[in-house]
Image (tube, rainbow, N blue to C red):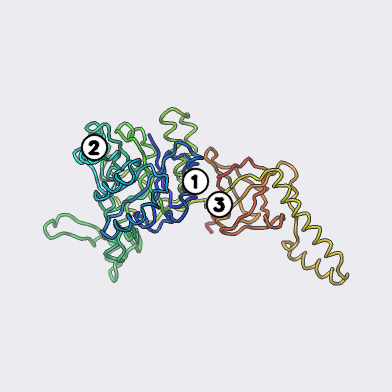
Amino acid sequence: MELVAPAGNLEKLKYAYTYGADAVYIGLKKFSLRIKADNFYEDEYKAITELKKKFPGKKLFCALNISFHNKDIDNFLSELDYFKSYPIDSFIIQDIGMVPILQKNFPYAALHLSTQANCINKEAVRMYKSLGFKRVVLGRETSLAEIREIKDAVPDMEMEAFGHGAMCISYSGRCLMSAYLTGRSANAGFCSHTCRWNFSVAEAKDLAESGKLYLTEEKRKDEHFPVFEGENFTAVLSSKDLCMIDHLDDMKKAGVDSLKIEGRMKSLYYVAMTTRAYRKAIDALEGRIKEEEALPYIAELYKASHREFGTGFYYSRDDADITTAGESSSDYELAATVGARLSDQEARAICEKGRALEADFKAKLDAMHPEAKAAKLKDYADHPDKVPHACSGDGQAKLYECKALNRIDEKTYVEYIGPDCTGIPDTDFRFVDPETGCFTPFISHNQAYLLYTGKPVKENWIIRTRVNKN
Protein backbone atom coordinates (compact mmCIF):
# COMPACT_ATOMS: atom_id res chain seq x y z
CA MET A 1 0.00 0.00 0.00
CA GLU A 2 1.41 3.34 -1.10
CA LEU A 3 1.74 6.18 1.42
CA VAL A 4 0.92 9.70 0.21
CA ALA A 5 1.82 12.65 2.44
CA PRO A 6 1.08 16.39 2.23
CA ALA A 7 3.55 19.24 1.70
CA GLY A 8 2.68 22.92 1.87
CA ASN A 9 6.21 24.09 1.05
CA LEU A 10 9.62 22.87 -0.07
CA GLU A 11 10.94 22.05 3.40
CA LYS A 12 7.85 19.97 4.24
CA LEU A 13 8.25 18.16 0.92
CA LYS A 14 11.80 17.19 1.89
CA TYR A 15 10.71 15.97 5.31
CA ALA A 16 7.75 14.03 3.90
CA TYR A 17 10.12 12.12 1.62
CA THR A 18 12.71 11.67 4.38
CA TYR A 19 10.19 10.35 6.90
CA GLY A 20 8.77 7.69 4.63
CA ALA A 21 6.27 8.96 2.06
CA ASP A 22 6.17 7.12 -1.25
CA ALA A 23 4.53 10.14 -2.85
CA VAL A 24 3.84 13.72 -1.79
CA TYR A 25 1.11 16.05 -3.00
CA ILE A 26 1.68 19.77 -3.37
CA GLY A 27 -0.25 22.78 -4.63
CA LEU A 28 0.86 25.25 -7.27
CA LYS A 29 0.17 28.94 -6.86
CA LYS A 30 -3.56 29.80 -7.04
CA PHE A 31 -4.89 26.52 -8.43
CA SER A 32 -5.02 24.52 -5.20
CA LEU A 33 -7.71 24.25 -2.55
CA ARG A 34 -5.17 25.30 0.07
CA ILE A 35 -4.39 28.86 -1.01
CA LYS A 36 -3.21 29.67 2.52
CA ALA A 37 -0.57 26.97 2.36
CA ASP A 38 2.75 28.33 1.16
CA ASN A 39 2.40 26.30 -2.04
CA PHE A 40 5.10 26.49 -4.71
CA TYR A 41 6.19 29.34 -6.93
CA GLU A 42 9.04 31.06 -8.78
CA ASP A 43 12.08 28.80 -9.29
CA GLU A 44 11.37 26.21 -6.59
CA TYR A 45 10.93 23.66 -9.36
CA LYS A 46 14.73 23.55 -9.57
CA ALA A 47 15.07 22.53 -5.92
CA ILE A 48 12.25 20.01 -6.26
CA THR A 49 13.89 18.46 -9.31
CA GLU A 50 17.14 18.04 -7.37
CA LEU A 51 15.24 16.69 -4.36
CA LYS A 52 13.57 14.00 -6.45
CA LYS A 53 16.99 12.94 -7.68
CA LYS A 54 18.01 12.37 -4.06
CA PHE A 55 14.90 10.23 -3.53
CA PRO A 56 14.66 8.04 -6.62
CA GLY A 57 11.33 6.34 -7.00
CA LYS A 58 9.45 8.90 -4.90
CA LYS A 59 6.51 10.52 -6.69
CA LEU A 60 5.22 14.08 -6.85
CA PHE A 61 1.48 14.73 -7.17
CA CYS A 62 0.12 18.20 -7.94
CA ALA A 63 -3.29 19.27 -6.63
CA LEU A 64 -5.17 21.38 -9.18
CA ASN A 65 -8.42 20.74 -7.37
CA ILE A 66 -10.21 24.07 -7.39
CA SER A 67 -13.43 24.57 -9.36
CA PHE A 68 -12.16 26.42 -12.42
CA HIS A 69 -13.90 29.51 -13.75
CA ASN A 70 -13.12 30.62 -17.31
CA LYS A 71 -10.55 33.11 -16.06
CA ASP A 72 -8.85 30.38 -14.02
CA ILE A 73 -8.40 28.21 -17.11
CA ASP A 74 -7.05 31.20 -19.02
CA ASN A 75 -4.58 31.89 -16.22
CA PHE A 76 -3.48 28.26 -16.14
CA LEU A 77 -2.93 28.16 -19.89
CA SER A 78 -0.89 31.36 -19.72
CA GLU A 79 1.52 29.68 -17.28
CA LEU A 80 1.86 26.28 -18.95
CA ASP A 81 5.59 26.60 -19.56
CA TYR A 82 6.15 27.35 -15.88
CA PHE A 83 4.14 24.34 -14.72
CA LYS A 84 5.98 22.09 -17.16
CA SER A 85 9.20 22.87 -15.26
CA TYR A 86 8.02 20.81 -12.29
CA PRO A 87 8.74 17.04 -12.22
CA ILE A 88 5.06 16.20 -11.72
CA ASP A 89 4.00 12.56 -11.89
CA SER A 90 0.25 13.16 -11.67
CA PHE A 91 -2.38 15.88 -11.35
CA ILE A 92 -5.20 15.69 -8.82
CA ILE A 93 -8.29 17.37 -10.28
CA GLN A 94 -12.03 17.54 -9.80
CA ASP A 95 -12.93 19.74 -12.79
CA ILE A 96 -13.62 17.62 -15.87
CA GLY A 97 -12.85 20.57 -18.10
CA MET A 98 -9.19 20.22 -17.17
CA VAL A 99 -8.95 16.65 -18.50
CA PRO A 100 -8.26 17.40 -22.19
CA ILE A 101 -6.02 20.36 -21.28
CA LEU A 102 -3.80 18.23 -19.06
CA GLN A 103 -3.80 15.24 -21.41
CA LYS A 104 -2.66 17.46 -24.28
CA ASN A 105 -0.01 19.44 -22.43
CA PHE A 106 1.19 16.87 -19.87
CA PRO A 107 0.91 13.49 -21.66
CA TYR A 108 3.48 11.97 -19.29
CA ALA A 109 1.49 12.80 -16.13
CA ALA A 110 -1.30 10.60 -14.80
CA LEU A 111 -4.73 11.95 -13.86
CA HIS A 112 -6.01 11.39 -10.34
CA LEU A 113 -9.60 12.27 -9.49
CA SER A 114 -9.82 14.52 -6.44
CA THR A 115 -11.93 13.55 -3.45
CA GLN A 116 -13.77 16.83 -4.17
CA ALA A 117 -15.49 15.05 -7.06
CA ASN A 118 -17.14 12.81 -4.41
CA CYS A 119 -16.78 9.63 -6.43
CA ILE A 120 -18.33 6.90 -4.29
CA ASN A 121 -19.70 4.23 -6.64
CA LYS A 122 -18.44 1.75 -9.21
CA GLU A 123 -20.34 3.23 -12.17
CA ALA A 124 -18.75 6.64 -11.61
CA VAL A 125 -15.33 4.98 -11.34
CA ARG A 126 -15.92 3.21 -14.68
CA MET A 127 -16.85 6.54 -16.26
CA TYR A 128 -13.74 8.29 -14.96
CA LYS A 129 -11.61 5.39 -16.19
CA SER A 130 -13.07 5.87 -19.67
CA LEU A 131 -11.99 9.53 -19.52
CA GLY A 132 -8.39 8.51 -18.88
CA PHE A 133 -8.08 8.69 -15.10
CA LYS A 134 -5.57 6.31 -13.57
CA ARG A 135 -6.64 6.78 -9.95
CA VAL A 136 -9.67 7.84 -7.94
CA VAL A 137 -9.27 9.51 -4.58
CA LEU A 138 -12.53 8.25 -3.17
CA GLY A 139 -15.06 10.47 -1.48
CA ARG A 140 -14.60 10.35 2.27
CA GLU A 141 -18.17 9.11 2.69
CA THR A 142 -17.27 5.74 1.14
CA SER A 143 -17.34 2.76 3.49
CA LEU A 144 -14.80 -0.04 3.40
CA ALA A 145 -17.51 -2.40 2.14
CA GLU A 146 -18.27 -0.04 -0.74
CA ILE A 147 -14.58 0.30 -1.59
CA ARG A 148 -14.34 -3.48 -1.89
CA GLU A 149 -17.31 -3.53 -4.27
CA ILE A 150 -15.79 -0.76 -6.39
CA LYS A 151 -12.39 -2.45 -6.57
CA ASP A 152 -13.96 -5.77 -7.56
CA ALA A 153 -15.93 -4.04 -10.31
CA VAL A 154 -13.03 -1.96 -11.66
CA PRO A 155 -9.88 -3.84 -10.55
CA ASP A 156 -7.46 -1.93 -12.77
CA MET A 157 -8.39 1.48 -11.38
CA GLU A 158 -6.13 2.60 -8.52
CA MET A 159 -8.01 3.38 -5.30
CA GLU A 160 -6.70 6.10 -3.00
CA ALA A 161 -8.40 6.88 0.30
CA PHE A 162 -7.73 9.23 3.18
CA GLY A 163 -6.38 7.46 6.24
CA HIS A 164 -5.53 10.34 8.54
CA GLY A 165 -6.26 13.99 9.17
CA ALA A 166 -8.99 16.59 9.39
CA MET A 167 -12.41 15.74 8.04
CA CYS A 168 -14.73 18.30 6.46
CA ILE A 169 -18.29 18.52 7.72
CA SER A 170 -19.56 19.06 4.16
CA TYR A 171 -19.98 16.33 1.60
CA SER A 172 -16.53 15.43 0.29
CA GLY A 173 -15.34 18.85 1.34
CA ARG A 174 -17.60 20.77 -1.07
CA CYS A 175 -18.38 23.43 1.50
CA LEU A 176 -20.34 26.68 1.10
CA MET A 177 -20.24 27.76 4.73
CA SER A 178 -16.99 29.70 4.51
CA ALA A 179 -18.19 31.66 1.48
CA TYR A 180 -21.52 32.39 3.17
CA LEU A 181 -20.08 33.63 6.47
CA THR A 182 -16.82 35.26 5.37
CA GLY A 183 -17.00 35.70 1.60
CA ARG A 184 -14.06 33.32 1.18
CA SER A 185 -14.90 30.33 -0.98
CA ALA A 186 -13.58 26.95 0.10
CA ASN A 187 -14.08 25.68 -3.45
CA ALA A 188 -11.64 28.32 -4.69
CA GLY A 189 -9.03 27.54 -2.04
CA PHE A 190 -9.86 30.23 0.52
CA CYS A 191 -11.54 28.16 3.26
CA SER A 192 -11.69 30.06 6.57
CA HIS A 193 -12.53 26.85 8.51
CA THR A 194 -15.74 28.30 9.91
CA CYS A 195 -16.91 24.81 10.85
CA ARG A 196 -14.18 24.78 13.52
CA TRP A 197 -15.36 27.99 15.16
CA ASN A 198 -16.86 27.92 18.65
CA PHE A 199 -20.38 29.33 18.69
CA SER A 200 -22.58 30.41 21.58
CA VAL A 201 -26.30 31.07 21.84
CA ALA A 202 -26.65 34.77 22.63
CA GLU A 203 -28.99 35.73 25.47
CA ALA A 204 -29.95 32.08 25.98
CA LYS A 205 -26.97 30.56 27.77
CA ASP A 206 -28.95 28.97 30.62
CA LEU A 207 -31.50 27.51 28.26
CA ALA A 208 -28.78 26.20 25.97
CA GLU A 209 -26.89 24.58 28.81
CA SER A 210 -30.07 22.86 29.95
CA GLY A 211 -30.05 20.72 26.83
CA LYS A 212 -33.61 21.75 25.98
CA LEU A 213 -32.64 23.99 23.08
CA TYR A 214 -32.70 22.24 19.72
CA LEU A 215 -33.71 22.69 16.11
CA THR A 216 -36.54 20.89 14.31
CA GLU A 217 -37.53 20.95 10.66
CA GLU A 218 -41.14 21.73 9.76
CA LYS A 219 -41.94 18.34 8.24
CA ARG A 220 -39.69 16.32 10.56
CA LYS A 221 -40.77 17.46 13.99
CA ASP A 222 -39.71 14.23 15.65
CA GLU A 223 -36.06 14.81 14.68
CA HIS A 224 -34.23 17.03 17.18
CA PHE A 225 -30.91 18.73 16.47
CA PRO A 226 -29.24 20.03 19.67
CA VAL A 227 -27.54 23.41 19.31
CA PHE A 228 -25.38 23.25 22.42
CA GLU A 229 -22.69 20.91 23.67
CA GLY A 230 -20.27 21.40 26.55
CA GLU A 231 -19.63 24.62 28.46
CA ASN A 232 -20.09 28.14 27.11
CA PHE A 233 -19.41 27.40 23.44
CA THR A 234 -20.07 24.60 20.98
CA ALA A 235 -18.52 23.51 17.73
CA VAL A 236 -21.71 22.13 16.21
CA LEU A 237 -20.14 21.45 12.80
CA SER A 238 -16.58 20.44 13.74
CA SER A 239 -15.92 16.80 12.91
CA LYS A 240 -13.41 14.45 14.49
CA ASP A 241 -10.04 13.89 12.89
CA LEU A 242 -9.70 10.68 10.92
CA CYS A 243 -7.21 8.09 12.19
CA MET A 244 -7.04 4.65 10.61
CA ILE A 245 -3.59 3.61 11.77
CA ASP A 246 -5.03 0.70 13.75
CA HIS A 247 -7.15 -0.46 10.81
CA LEU A 248 -4.71 -0.55 7.88
CA ASP A 249 -5.29 -4.27 7.34
CA ASP A 250 -8.99 -3.59 6.79
CA MET A 251 -8.19 -0.81 4.31
CA LYS A 252 -5.85 -3.04 2.37
CA LYS A 253 -8.36 -5.90 2.29
CA ALA A 254 -10.98 -3.45 1.02
CA GLY A 255 -8.79 -2.73 -2.00
CA VAL A 256 -7.15 0.56 -1.04
CA ASP A 257 -3.97 0.90 -3.10
CA SER A 258 -2.83 4.20 -1.66
CA LEU A 259 -3.35 5.72 1.78
CA LYS A 260 -3.44 9.50 1.97
CA ILE A 261 -2.60 11.82 4.87
CA GLU A 262 -4.41 15.18 4.99
CA GLY A 263 -2.58 18.34 5.99
CA ARG A 264 -0.87 20.67 3.52
CA MET A 265 -1.44 23.50 6.00
CA LYS A 266 -0.13 21.51 8.96
CA SER A 267 3.31 21.99 10.49
CA LEU A 268 6.54 20.32 9.46
CA TYR A 269 6.43 18.46 12.79
CA TYR A 270 2.96 17.09 11.99
CA VAL A 271 4.04 16.02 8.50
CA ALA A 272 7.14 14.24 9.80
CA MET A 273 5.51 12.53 12.79
CA THR A 274 2.38 11.42 10.93
CA THR A 275 4.22 10.23 7.84
CA ARG A 276 6.71 8.28 9.95
CA ALA A 277 3.98 6.59 12.01
CA TYR A 278 2.08 5.39 8.94
CA ARG A 279 5.31 4.36 7.20
CA LYS A 280 6.20 2.08 10.10
CA ALA A 281 2.64 0.77 10.40
CA ILE A 282 2.46 -0.09 6.69
CA ASP A 283 5.90 -1.69 6.79
CA ALA A 284 4.76 -3.85 9.71
CA LEU A 285 1.54 -4.76 7.91
CA GLU A 286 3.45 -5.83 4.80
CA GLY A 287 6.15 -7.74 6.69
CA ARG A 288 9.14 -5.44 6.19
CA ILE A 289 9.53 -4.88 9.92
CA LYS A 290 8.10 -6.57 13.01
CA GLU A 291 4.96 -5.17 14.61
CA GLU A 292 6.76 -4.44 17.87
CA GLU A 293 9.25 -2.29 15.93
CA ALA A 294 6.42 -0.11 14.62
CA LEU A 295 4.59 0.39 17.92
CA PRO A 296 6.85 3.12 19.39
CA TYR A 297 6.45 5.19 16.23
CA ILE A 298 2.68 4.70 16.20
CA ALA A 299 2.56 5.87 19.82
CA GLU A 300 4.44 9.02 18.78
CA LEU A 301 1.56 9.87 16.43
CA TYR A 302 -0.44 11.06 19.44
CA LYS A 303 2.29 13.56 20.38
CA ALA A 304 1.34 15.80 17.45
CA SER A 305 -1.64 18.10 18.00
CA HIS A 306 -4.94 16.70 16.77
CA ARG A 307 -8.65 16.69 17.43
CA GLU A 308 -10.43 13.67 18.84
CA PHE A 309 -9.77 10.71 16.55
CA GLY A 310 -12.41 8.65 14.78
CA THR A 311 -12.80 6.24 11.86
CA GLY A 312 -15.01 8.44 9.72
CA PHE A 313 -17.47 6.64 7.42
CA TYR A 314 -15.36 3.50 6.97
CA TYR A 315 -17.34 1.32 9.39
CA SER A 316 -20.43 3.36 10.21
CA ARG A 317 -21.54 6.93 9.66
CA ASP A 318 -22.49 7.10 13.34
CA ASP A 319 -18.88 7.89 14.24
CA ALA A 320 -18.62 10.52 11.49
CA ASP A 321 -21.75 12.26 12.75
CA ILE A 322 -20.25 12.99 16.17
CA THR A 323 -18.86 16.52 16.42
CA THR A 324 -15.99 17.56 18.63
CA ALA A 325 -14.44 20.78 19.89
CA GLY A 326 -10.87 22.02 20.15
CA GLU A 327 -7.77 19.90 19.71
CA SER A 328 -5.43 17.97 21.94
CA SER A 329 -2.33 19.84 22.98
CA SER A 330 1.03 18.20 22.46
CA ASP A 331 3.71 17.81 25.13
CA TYR A 332 6.25 18.77 22.48
CA GLU A 333 6.78 21.43 19.87
CA LEU A 334 9.12 21.72 16.93
CA ALA A 335 12.15 23.82 17.90
CA ALA A 336 14.68 23.40 15.09
CA THR A 337 15.76 21.25 12.18
CA VAL A 338 19.17 19.64 11.81
CA GLY A 339 21.09 20.15 8.59
CA ALA A 340 24.27 18.65 7.21
CA ARG A 341 27.22 17.83 9.44
CA LEU A 342 30.22 20.08 8.88
CA SER A 343 33.32 18.39 7.54
CA ASP A 344 36.35 18.24 9.84
CA GLN A 345 37.98 20.98 7.79
CA GLU A 346 34.89 23.22 8.01
CA ALA A 347 34.65 22.60 11.75
CA ARG A 348 38.30 23.51 12.29
CA ALA A 349 37.81 26.75 10.38
CA ILE A 350 34.84 27.67 12.61
CA CYS A 351 36.81 26.86 15.77
CA GLU A 352 39.84 28.83 14.58
CA LYS A 353 37.61 31.82 13.93
CA GLY A 354 36.29 31.56 17.48
CA ARG A 355 39.75 31.23 19.02
CA ALA A 356 40.96 34.29 17.09
CA LEU A 357 38.01 36.33 18.35
CA GLU A 358 38.54 35.07 21.88
CA ALA A 359 42.27 36.01 21.74
CA ASP A 360 41.50 39.46 20.32
CA PHE A 361 38.93 40.04 23.07
CA LYS A 362 41.47 39.09 25.76
CA ALA A 363 44.19 41.27 24.20
CA LYS A 364 41.92 44.31 24.16
CA LEU A 365 40.90 43.67 27.75
CA ASP A 366 44.51 43.33 28.90
CA ALA A 367 45.42 46.59 27.14
CA MET A 368 42.88 48.58 29.14
CA HIS A 369 43.70 50.88 32.06
CA PRO A 370 43.38 48.85 35.30
CA GLU A 371 40.33 50.80 36.48
CA ALA A 372 38.61 50.47 33.12
CA LYS A 373 39.49 46.77 33.02
CA ALA A 374 38.08 46.27 36.53
CA ALA A 375 34.81 47.94 35.46
CA LYS A 376 34.64 45.74 32.37
CA LEU A 377 35.32 42.59 34.37
CA LYS A 378 32.49 43.51 36.76
CA ASP A 379 30.16 44.04 33.80
CA TYR A 380 31.19 40.70 32.31
CA ALA A 381 30.59 38.98 35.66
CA ASP A 382 27.04 40.34 35.61
CA HIS A 383 26.59 39.59 31.90
CA PRO A 384 28.69 36.51 31.05
CA ASP A 385 27.04 36.21 27.63
CA LYS A 386 29.12 39.25 26.54
CA VAL A 387 32.32 37.22 26.87
CA PRO A 388 33.17 35.20 23.74
CA HIS A 389 33.83 31.51 24.31
CA ALA A 390 35.26 29.75 21.29
CA CYS A 391 33.99 26.36 20.19
CA SER A 392 36.92 24.07 20.88
CA GLY A 393 35.93 21.25 18.55
CA ASP A 394 37.52 18.78 20.98
CA GLY A 395 36.17 15.37 21.91
CA GLN A 396 33.33 13.45 20.27
CA ALA A 397 31.01 16.42 19.69
CA LYS A 398 30.42 17.47 16.08
CA LEU A 399 29.04 20.57 14.39
CA TYR A 400 25.81 20.49 12.36
CA GLU A 401 23.90 23.12 10.46
CA CYS A 402 20.79 24.05 12.42
CA LYS A 403 17.74 26.19 11.59
CA ALA A 404 15.85 27.53 14.60
CA LEU A 405 12.05 27.54 14.43
CA ASN A 406 11.51 28.56 18.05
CA ARG A 407 13.72 29.97 20.78
CA ILE A 408 15.97 27.47 22.55
CA ASP A 409 18.46 28.24 25.30
CA GLU A 410 21.02 26.00 26.98
CA LYS A 411 18.60 25.13 29.79
CA THR A 412 15.88 23.92 27.44
CA TYR A 413 15.02 20.22 27.43
CA VAL A 414 15.58 18.98 23.90
CA GLU A 415 15.14 15.70 22.08
CA TYR A 416 16.32 14.66 18.66
CA ILE A 417 13.96 12.60 16.51
CA GLY A 418 14.53 11.08 13.09
CA PRO A 419 12.95 8.73 10.56
CA ASP A 420 14.15 5.75 12.60
CA CYS A 421 14.59 7.35 16.03
CA THR A 422 11.79 8.13 18.47
CA GLY A 423 13.83 10.42 20.68
CA ILE A 424 17.34 11.06 22.02
CA PRO A 425 17.46 13.53 24.95
CA ASP A 426 20.43 15.88 25.12
CA THR A 427 21.50 17.98 28.09
CA ASP A 428 25.01 18.80 26.87
CA PHE A 429 24.22 20.47 23.55
CA ARG A 430 25.57 23.92 22.67
CA PHE A 431 24.88 26.32 19.84
CA VAL A 432 27.58 28.12 17.88
CA ASP A 433 27.30 31.35 15.93
CA PRO A 434 28.78 30.54 12.50
CA GLU A 435 29.81 34.18 12.04
CA THR A 436 31.97 34.27 15.17
CA GLY A 437 32.84 30.63 15.91
CA CYS A 438 31.77 31.21 19.52
CA PHE A 439 29.06 29.65 21.65
CA THR A 440 25.77 31.51 21.91
CA PRO A 441 23.45 31.08 24.94
CA PHE A 442 20.28 30.82 22.85
CA ILE A 443 18.97 30.63 19.30
CA SER A 444 16.00 32.49 17.86
CA HIS A 445 13.28 31.81 15.32
CA ASN A 446 14.24 31.43 11.67
CA GLN A 447 17.95 32.03 12.12
CA ALA A 448 20.80 29.73 11.11
CA TYR A 449 23.15 28.43 13.78
CA LEU A 450 25.43 25.46 14.34
CA LEU A 451 24.50 22.65 16.71
CA TYR A 452 27.38 21.26 18.77
CA THR A 453 26.56 17.82 20.15
CA GLY A 454 28.03 14.43 20.82
CA LYS A 455 24.73 12.66 20.13
CA PRO A 456 24.43 10.59 16.92
CA VAL A 457 22.13 13.00 15.08
CA LYS A 458 21.73 13.09 11.31
CA GLU A 459 20.73 15.51 8.60
CA ASN A 460 16.96 16.20 8.43
CA TRP A 461 16.39 15.18 12.02
CA ILE A 462 14.17 17.35 14.18
CA ILE A 463 14.89 19.03 17.49
CA ARG A 464 11.82 19.20 19.69
CA THR A 465 11.29 20.74 23.11
CA ARG A 466 8.79 20.08 25.86
CA VAL A 467 5.92 22.51 26.07
CA ASN A 468 5.62 24.49 29.31
CA LYS A 469 1.95 24.18 30.21
CA ASN A 470 2.09 26.31 33.37
Instruction: Compare marks 2 and 3 and give the one earlier in the sequence.
Output: 2
Quarter of the image containing the N terminus? Answer: top left
Name the amino acid, label 1.
Answer: Lys
Residue 255 or 292: which is nearer the viewer?
255
Residue annotated with mark 1: 14
Image height of 409 relative to 131, above or below:
below
Give the SS element for disc 1.
helix
Marks 2, 1: nearer the viewer? 1
Residue 85 or 127: which is nearer the viewer?
85
- Which label was assigned to residue 153? none
Name the amino acid, label 3.
Answer: Arg
Instruction: Compare marks 2 and 1 and give the one earlier in the sequence.
Output: 1
Residue annotated with mark 3: 466
Instruction: Give the x, y percent position of residue 363.
Output: 84, 62
Q: Are marks 2 and 1 in contact (CB under 8 Å)?
A: no
Q: Residue furthest right?
A: 370
Left or right of residue 131: residue 375: right
Instruction: Give the x, y percent position of residue 26.
Output: 40, 49
**To which quarter of the image does residue 71 belong?**
bottom left
Distance CA(mark 2)–CA(mark 1): 35 Å
Left or right of residue 324: residue 215: left
Name the amino acid, label 2.
Answer: Glu
Q: Residue furthest left?
A: 219
Residue annotated with mark 2: 146
* Image label count: 3
Q: Residue furthest top?
A: 287
Q: Residues within 10 Å of mark 3 (few under 14, many from 20)?
A: some
